[in-house]
C-alpha cells in the first residue's frame, strides 16, 4: 500500500509521527486514515477516505479516540464521525531564540525510580510509558514531581511538547520551567520544538507565547462530546 506523506511541518506533525512510528494505515494515495500504534488514542485523516476506511480505523482505537483533521477536509471528516465535536487547534513553532532556563523551581529528568503514586491514574500511565523511552523533564516541590514536560510527538525534524501540571501547583512557574528545560534539550538534539493548543485553552496559548512560540498553522480535533460521555 503506497501513501503520500505530508510535508514535515507543524500542522502535519501528528500524521508524520504516526507514520514514522509505524502506526496502522487505512487507504492509499492521498486519502487515508493513520493511527497511533497501540494503545491508540488518536488517529488522523488525510484527504477524503471513505466511511469504510474510517470504520476500520475506529475499530482498533479507544472509544474516546480523538480524530484529527485539517481545514481542507474538515467537513468531510465531520460527516464520517458526526458524533464528535470539532475544535480548532492552534499550532505553534519556535523561531529559535530559546527562553532562559530558570534556576528555580528545581527541574530535572524524571527517572524510573521517581514515585508517581501521587499522580492521577490516567496521567501516571502516560508518564510511565513516556519515561521508558524519552526524557521527561519534571519540576519538583518537596521531593515530588508536580509538573511534566516531554515530546509527545516527534518527526525527523520536529518535536511537539506535552505539558501537564498537577492540581494545586498551577500558575506557579512550574510549567514554564519544565518546558524551558525540554526546549533546550530538543534543540540540542536538532529538533525544532512545536506546541499545540485548543482554542479554548487560553492558559496553554499564553504559556506558548511566554516561551517564545509563534503561530504556525491550524488543525482540528474532533472529540466525543463531553456531555455525551458515560461518567
Image: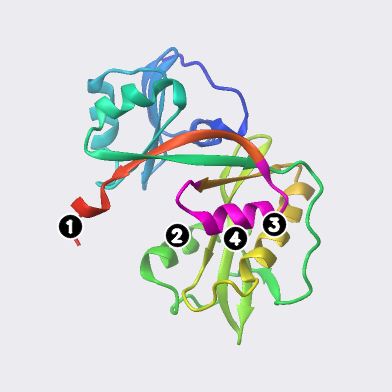
Q: Position of residue 226 (x, y in %)?
A: 26, 53
Q: Label 2, secondary structure: give it.
A: helix
Which circle, 3 or 1, is nearer the viewer?
A: 3
Residue drawn at x 69%, y 72% as measured from the top left: 107
Q: Label 1, secondary structure: give it.
A: loop
Quadrant of the image for the C terminus?
A: bottom left
Which circle, 3 or 2, is nearer the viewer?
A: 3
Query: Is any atom of residue 209 visible in this view?
Result: yes
Q: Are marks 1 and 4 in contact (CB under 8 Å)?
A: no
Q: Name the residue under label 1.
A: 230
Q: How crowded is mark 1: few (under 14 residues within 10 Å), some or many (20 or more)?
A: few
Alpha carbons under labels 1 and 4: distance apart: 29 Å
Indicate which disc residue 149 carries. 4
Q: Quadrant of residue 147?
A: bottom right
Q: Mark 3 points at which residue?
A: 210
Residue drawn at x 79%, y 74% as measured from the top left: 103
Q: Name the residue under label 2.
A: 126
Amino acid at each position: 500500500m503506497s501513501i503520500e506523506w505530508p510535508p514535515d511541518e507543524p500542522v502535519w506533525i501528528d500524521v508524520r509521527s504516526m507514520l514514522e512510528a509505524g502506526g496502522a494505515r487505512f487507504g492509499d494515495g492521498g486519502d487515508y486514515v493513520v493511527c497511533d500504534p497501540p494503545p491508540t488514542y488518536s488517529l488522523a485523516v488525510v484527504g477524503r477516505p471513505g466511511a469504510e476506511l474510517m470504520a476500520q480505523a475506529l475499530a482498533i482505537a479507544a472509544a474516546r479516540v480523538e480524530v484529527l483533521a485539517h481545514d481542507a477536509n474538515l467537513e468531510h471528516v465531520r460527516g464520517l464521525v458526526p458524533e464528535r465535536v470539532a475544535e480548532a487547534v492552534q499550532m505553534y513553532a519556535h523561531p529559535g531564540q530559546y527562553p532562559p532556563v530558570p534556576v528555580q523551581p528545581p527541574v530535572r529528568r524524571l527517572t524510573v525510580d521517581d514515585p508517581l503514586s501521587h499522580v492521577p491514574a490516567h496521567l501516571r500511565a502516560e508518564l510511565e510509558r513516556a519515561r521508558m523511552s524519552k526524557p521527561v523533564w519534571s519540576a519538583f516541590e518537596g521531593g515530588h514531581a508536580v509538573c511534566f514536560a516531554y515530546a509527545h510527538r516527534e518527526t525527523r525534524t520536529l518535536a511537539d511538547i506535552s505539558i501537564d501540571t498537577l492540581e494545586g501547583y498551577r500558575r506557579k512557574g512550574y510549567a514554564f520551567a519544565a518546558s524551558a528545560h525540554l526546549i533546550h534539550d530538543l534543540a540540542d538534539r536538532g529538533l525544532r520544538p512545536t506546541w499545540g493548543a485548543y482554542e479554548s485553552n487560553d492558559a496553554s496559548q499564553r504559556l506558548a507565547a511566554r516561551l517564545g512560540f509563534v503561530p504556525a498553522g491550524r488543525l482540528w480535533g474532533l472529540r466525543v462530546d463531553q456531555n455525551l460521555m458515560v461518567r
